[in-house]
Amino acid sequence: MAARSAGVNSAVPCPVRQATWASVAPNRRASPVWEPSQYLDALRLDTRTAIISFTRVETSPSARTARKCSKKVRRRAGACARVRNMLGTAPRSAMNESNIGLREASAPAGSTAGSLLMRASIRACYRPRVALRALLLVLVSGAAIADTVTVRDADALRRAVREAKPGRTVLVAPGEYAGGLWFENVNGEAGKPVVVAGADPKNPPVFRGGGEAMHFAGARHLELRDLAVEGATANGISVDDAGRRDGSTHHVTIRNVRFTGIGARGNEDALKLSGVDEFRVEGCAFERWGTGGGSAVDMVGCHKGTIESCTFRHPGAANAVQAKAGCASVTVRRCRFDDAGSRAVNIGGSTGLEFFRPPLDKPPFAEARDIVVEGCTFAGSDAPVAFVGVDGAVVRFNTFYAPRRWAMRILQETTADGFVPCRNGEFSRNVVVFRSDRWSEGGVNVGGGTDAATFRFEGNVWFCADAPARSKPRLPSAEKDGVYGTDPKLADPEKGDLSLGKGSPVRGAGAEALQQAGLPEK
């Protein structure tokens, strides 16, 4: 039975059988990868029984790894007990040659750092049964390492993703692809995510048009990377829990994806996450999304996530990042916001009660909890940060330059029974540079129905560029260790460089100080 399924006819006498296998493994960060010695142990054959030509390619550093493996093969070319047990023992006289060799090769086009290519060819002599067992060993070993498919059109992409088992990597060739792709229940496993990635990170595939470029309804251990999304009329990419609201969608990574020109004048989002837990958005670029309430990243009932090292730009938008509907334990870190909406980061918001995740049960309720914004740089916006119906949030170690009205807002928009007033916020170790003619209400807008007195202010640097004597803000509670009227001497703000220049008197505040503070990452 095994022989038939493998396509080998054991009744045909043939002194030499050959089988080959090749595969590209997932990125090391996304999937566990064997060490060289483990590959050798798995594929080493008794030198009395077969010949193996085994090639390992690693994009960095390939030569060093290949030499290391080659020495190990020559030194340890004896029989592997595990393989010998599978193959049985052939008489020494049956073998007319024996050798195990390793050679270096070049990485294929589209390989990414940390990926590897393996080719193994077996020529087994004397017994067809020996050839079959050797073939099965290679196939089983290869299947455990990688499942990679390269696609060049939208239909092939649909098939590859819908059929994906844990550990599959779908490489999308450069080119233009029509939007409107819908996927359900794309599920990887811990250490074996389903990956959809551009085959060439320097020339990413472009998904253009459609209501949504991609929509994933239900997903676990999913990674999207090295893609471009343009011109979707609704949302760019959506990932949600298919309305289940049960935490079943989790471990989603969006990395190095470029979003441009999403939506128009409505509530359209570049990246929409609903009911997603344990997520990461990293190294993405967002430019232009829906101006009528849309966000670059809109989170609805999401938990335990990080948005890091992303850039945002859209003058006239509502906001860039929004966390609402029960979002909790979300960190926005080391991002750049260039005139990225009226409220660049909207911590909280206003949400229909039926959209909260988890579903509302016992009060107290809040739009968001435990949200951290740190190490970010903001230029422009009416208010770079707004606390809206939150119960606990921290904004620390950020640099704010030339806000148009306020440094921050404290608001309450959801007033249903059981919801707490906006409270327990922290604004600390930030650098705020503003102008007196673009400064309203002393820099902090406090709305009705809030508990602004519970907000804590500490160690912020406030500087009014055109009137240093007017630098002290009007805060809802007393600030501890605030610095007022000291020019932080930003390097070159007119050209966008908001780092601290040489000779800056500021220490321990602003975006650059986050790393120096040595705080544990949340």
Image (spheres, grey):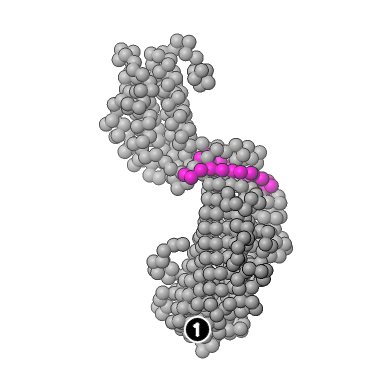
Placement of 327 over or under 108, stated as above or below: below
Residue 66, how many percent across, how many down?
A: 35, 37
> Of helix, strand and loop, which one carries label 1?
loop
According to the picture, the residue beneath numbered tag 1 turns out to be: 478
Residue 176 lies in the magenta stretch: yes
Residue 465, how many percent across, how many down?
A: 53, 83
Residue 245, how many percent across, how many down?
A: 62, 53
Q: Name the residue nearer the viewer: 69 or 239.
A: 239
Q: Name the residue nearer the viewer: 83 or 8.
A: 83
In the image, the segment drawn in magenta is 167-191
Q: Name the residue nearer the viewer: 314 or 249.
A: 249
Placement of 498 over or under 331, stated as above or below: below
Residue 292, how many percent across, how many down?
A: 71, 65
- Say few, some or many: other residues with alpha carbon within 10 Å of mark 1 (under 14 / 14 to 19 / 20 or more): few
* Residue visible at 60% across and 63% down in the picture: 362
Task: Give the amino acid type for the residue marked by disc 1 in the picture.
Answer: Ala
- Residue 425 lies left or right of residue 131; in this view the side is right
* Residue visible at 44% across and 39% down in the picture: 116
* Residue visible at 36% across and 19% down in the picture: 88
Residue 475 lies in the magenta stretch: no
